Image (cartoon, rainbow, N blue to C red):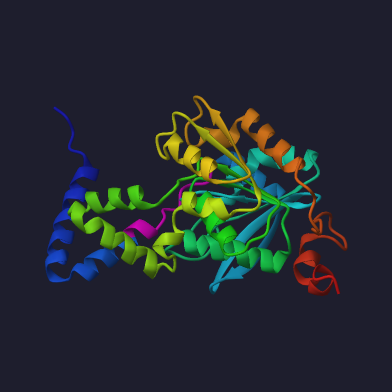
Amino acid sequence: MPRPNPNAKRIQALRLCFKALRTLSPDLARRGAERLFSTPRRHEEPEPERAARQQGRPFHFMSRGLRLKGYAWGEGPAVLCLHGWEGRGAQFHAFVEPLARAGFTTIAFDQPGHGGSQGRMSGPSDWAQAIQDLVATLGPIHGLVAHSLGSVGAAVAMDRGLQVAGAVLVAPPARPDPYYSQVLSLLGFPERDHPAALRAYLQRRGLPPERSHVNLLAPSFTAAGLLIHDRGDREVPWNDGATIASAWPAATFLTTEGLGHHRILRDAAVIEAAVAFLQQLPITRTLPIHGNGARSLDWHLFQRDLRMGA
């Protein structure tokens, strides 16, 4: 005899609650869906991430009143690594050594509501602001590597003026519509209500709907791009990456096979391609972060006069 699925019972209860809430107040129902969609779960940290974090140089910075936690590894111009939904900065542990050998500092942080950072609700606009606040605190970065939803945060930050020589986007979603529609359908919202609910969500989260589609932002990007996507990705369709790459004037598209959505971040060939791409970019005016002396991370973060060229 099959066991009852506890998740199915929870979903049924949620659908009944939201059906009643939509009758009482459609706006409150939409806000409840937004909260569910925007609240990440904090998962247990795997051992490879813990080990990498312990070897990194920790730092904190502020964004929208939240204290966000980050780490730095290596020496040289900074490469910022941006995790995806319900991830952590240390998910890029496999990139640390290859980037260090190539002469780069790896910078990673936990986005709002994730890992060791403060916050509960989170989304692409918050992530883009966190990226901008990090760069305003730390100084210019050479390039970035972003995974999944981190790619959306990176794209929004670039659309808002973030300057990088190049960006590597791994498994990037082209648009938020399908993912929000999945949640709305799960909660029993009629399909005809989805577009208005999505617009309300984006506007309340500080991201105009027309600025939420990476494939629509990409034509204005002046930085070089490398997009990497696995053909069998079950979370973000391969076509999303291909669509963004085709719209980005200076982008190259790399397809992988058999790596899915998460293993792609640990694949040696993917990491090699990303590092080689970053190496061929022109070095911009960046201040290296390394050692424990005058150019240690703490010194770099707070000696604004030197960083600003005074």
Query: Does residue 150 appear anywhere in the picture?
Result: no
Most frequent secondary structure within the magenta stretch: loop
Q: Quadrant of the C terminus?
A: bottom right
Question: Could you say where residue 69 lies in the image, as x and y percent from the top left?
Answer: 61, 61
| Total numbered badges shown on the rendered structure | 0
Instruction: Indicate yes or no whether the magenta region holds residue 39.
Output: yes
The residue at the far top in this view is: 258
Left or right of residue 170: residue 206: left
Q: Residue at image x 16%, y 29%?
A: 2
Identified at 18% across, 60% down, the residue is 18
Residue 249 percent across, percent down from the top left: 60, 46
Which of 26 and 192 lies nearest the eye of the viewer?
192
Residue 260 placement, left or right of 295: left
Based on the displayed image, in which of its 4 quarters is residue 131 positioned? bottom right
The answer to whether residue 20 is left or right of residue 63 is left
Q: Residue at x 33, y 53 (%)?
A: 180
In the picture provided, is 244 more to the left or to the right than 7? Answer: right
Please check the rendered image and state whether residue 142 is part of the magenta-colored stretch, yes or no: no
At horizontal 35% and vertical 57% (from top left) the residue drawn is 37
Image quarter of the N terminus: top left
Is residue 277 visible from the viewing direction of this image? yes
- Residue 25 is situated, as x and y percent measured from the top left of the image, at 17, 71
Question: Could you tell me residue 17's position as x and y percent?
Answer: 16, 60
Identify which residue, 162 or 263, lies in the foreground. 162
Quarter of the image for residue 205 reads bottom left
User: In the picture shown, does residue 296 fall above or below 168?
Assistant: below
Specify the segment rendered in magenta: 36-45
Q: Nearer the viewer, residue 239 or 149?
A: 239
The image shows residue 205, relative to residue 4, as above or below, that is: below
